[in-house]
Image (cartoon, helix red, strand yellow):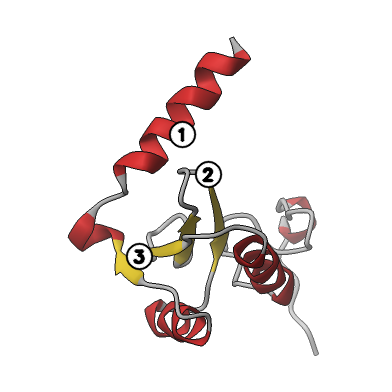
């Protein structure tokens, strides 16, 4: 027997069917994006962002020119394994911050848009 609350049908769900307010875990498409992105650029470094109440652990990949991308990753250990496999340095954002070239790239993109 399954108990159903009076308002269960009114609770919102995301595009992926998850209940609102639940954190989405890293998926194979997240990992695939990171792999493809890193393979198509050079001088890539990884910056791991810790899990928060709003998001799971994420990793930001930053290329030599400051271009960057962010995706979810399972854990700091998973990010370290990802970096080791690709001979890529992995840093914890909470310890070292973001690289200056990333901020400069973002600023250039804002100016170019307008």
Looking at the image, residue 27 lies above or below residue 50: below
Left or right side of 52 for 24: right
Q: Position of residue 13 (x, y in %)?
A: 73, 55
Q: Position of residue 60 (x, y in %)?
A: 47, 57
Residue pictured at 30% horizontal, 41% vertical: 100
Which one is closest to the eye, mark 3 or mark 1? 1
Looking at the image, residue 58 lies above or below residue 28: above
Q: Residues within 10 Å of mark 2 (few under 14, many from 20)?
A: some
Residue beneath label 3, please?
50
At mark 3, the secondary structure is loop
User: How many angstroms separate mark 2 from mark 3 (CA)?
Assistant: 21 Å
Q: Earlier in the sequence, mark 2 or mark 3?
A: 3
Locate the C terminus by quadrant: top right
Q: Residues within 10 Å of mark 3 (few under 14, many from 20)?
A: some
- Please tell me the numbered disc located at residue 51: none
Residue pictured at 37% horizontal, 35% vertical: 103
Left or right side of 65 for 49: left
Looking at the image, residue 82 lies above or below residue 33: below
Q: Position of residue 32 (x, y in %)?
A: 71, 71
User: How many angstroms separate mark 3 from mark 1 (CA)?
Assistant: 23 Å
Residue beneath label 2, please?
67
Left or right side of 82 for 93: left
- Please tell me the numbered disc located at residue 105: 1
User: How many angstroms separate mark 2 from mark 1 (CA)?
Assistant: 6 Å
Count numbered badges in the picture. 3
Q: Earlier in the sequence, mark 2 or mark 1?
A: 2
């Amino acid at each position: 027997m399954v108990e159903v609350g009076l308002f269960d049908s009114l609770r919102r769900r995301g595009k992926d069917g998850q209940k609102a307010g639940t954190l989405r875990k890293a998926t194979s498409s997240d990992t695939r994006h990171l792999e493809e992105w890193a393979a198509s650029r050079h001088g890539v470094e990884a910056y791991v962002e810790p899990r928060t109440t709003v998001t799971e652990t994420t990793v930001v990949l930053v290329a030599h020119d400051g271009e960057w991308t962010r995706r979810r990753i399972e854990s700091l250990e998973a990010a370290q394994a990802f970096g080791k496999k690709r001979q890529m340095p992995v840093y914890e954002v909470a310890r070292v911050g973001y690289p200056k070239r990333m901020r400069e790239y973002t600023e250039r993109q804002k100016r170019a848009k307008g």
